[in-house]
Amino acid sequence: MISTRELAELAQVSQSTISRCLNDHPSISFETKERVRKLALQYGYVESRKGQKALFSGKRRTIGVLITDRPFFDDLFINYTLNLIMTRAAEKNYYIIPLPLSTHKQGGMEKLRDLIRLNIVDSFLILHRHFDQPLHQYLSECGIPHVYLLHCSRNSYQAVDIIDSDNCAGGYIAAEHLLRHGHQKIIAVTCPFREYEDRTNGYRQALEEAGIPCREDFVLSVDTCYESAYRTVCENTALFSQATAVYVQSDILTLAVANALQDNGFSIPEDISLVGSDGYQLGGIARPALDSVAHPISELVDLALSRLMEIADTKRPQTPRQIILRPYLIRRGSVRTLQED
């Protein structure tokens, strides 16, 4: 904890200017206020108001979770993860504030600055699908601990803390599972986001190692919503008739593909085998129950919270870590062995 005099020396302004900055006085420029507030956050300055030490305290117990701004049903994976974060954080006596925010959207950075000025959040978990350079730079300049959870596993940024599942391995596990059951004509249903790109690369790698050419028309990209996947199957039934198996890269999309196939006369797994990705209970209550590549979300959340608290509690600069866990296969009976025919 530092004094206003020390803070003034760091900012190279007078103590009276420090007071005006922290009280948002209109006579002080925005740039000066930002510089002083960043230094106050970085060095743990504590301001007393009416006998209560509140502003810029270094020992708050609230974590902001910056999430992708998408509807719940369309992004079940993110919302399941968020729910688990809230449960695990409560066990450690932390509060969680979910924040749908991206600095790439108009006004996003201003909203983040306003939030930080309120001084109710002292660290962040980031669940964005794309690396947000302005966000990372601003939080780093402010000295605010932050960890990326479920960001990207391949070619990950060495300068940031990332806790993630190995999505490339997930795609490989799914394709290898189908290949072991004699399938060679495997359609992949993917989405235009980084983790899905990694899953597709794993699928391609497994086919390549098995000596099977990857048909580009067998890689179908859809939006991350049920309706898009269902519609894509209905519009491509002739293509699905050529395949013996389908690898779908999220469980909500797997349910859509299963329903669309069955609505168009396909029987699972008799006519076509199916494996999804995520490992939700959703796949277990589907009919038929669906095989899935499960990502170890519980372990990932625990690691992310532990790492965030470690950074927040350590005064010394921390070397960023990239912790990547391997997914695993859940078998429920939606994959048939072709050699049994």
Image (spheres, rainbow, N blue to C red):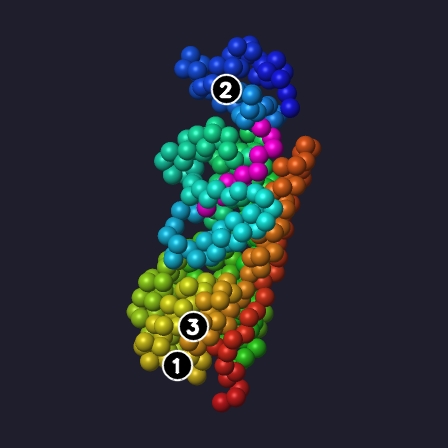
Q: Earlier in the sequence, mark 2 or mark 1?
A: 2
Q: Earlier in the sequence, mark 3 or mark 2?
A: 2
User: Residue at horizontal 36%, vertical 72%?
Assistant: 259
Secondary structure at numbered mark 1: loop
- Total of numbered circles in the picture? 3
In the rendered image, which residue does mark 3 sit on?
Answer: 286
Rendered position, 228 above or below 118? below
Q: Nearer the viewer, residue 36 or 302?
A: 302
Rendered position, 282 above or below 1? below
Rendered position, 81 above or below 205? above
Tell me where residue 165 sits by quadrant: bottom right
Secondary structure at numbered mark 2: helix
What x and y, as percent, mark residue 121? 52, 35
Q: Nearer the viewer, residue 239 or 304?
A: 304
Position of the N terminus, as image quadrant, is top right
What x and y, as percent, mark residue 127? 49, 47
Q: Nearer the viewer, residue 270 or 71?
A: 71
Query: Marks 1 and 3: CB-CB under 8 Å?
Result: no
Q: Visible in this render: residue 169? A: no
Q: Earlier in the sequence, mark 1 or mark 3?
A: 1
In the rendered image, which residue does mark 2 sit on?
Answer: 22
In the rendered image, which residue does mark 1 sit on?
Answer: 267
Task: Nearest to the eye among marks 2 and 1: give it.
Answer: 2
The CA distance from mark 3 to mark 2 is 56 Å
Query: Quick check: is 57 in the magenta stretch?
Result: yes
Is disc 1 surrounded by few (<14), some (14 to 19) or many (20+) residues within 10 Å? some
Please provide the residue range marked out in magenta: 56-67
- Name of the residue lying farthest toward the bottom: 341
Q: Amino acid at mark 1?
A: Ser
Rendered position, 190 above or below 62? below
Secondary structure at numbered mark 3: loop
Q: Is residue 261 left or right of residue 94?
A: left
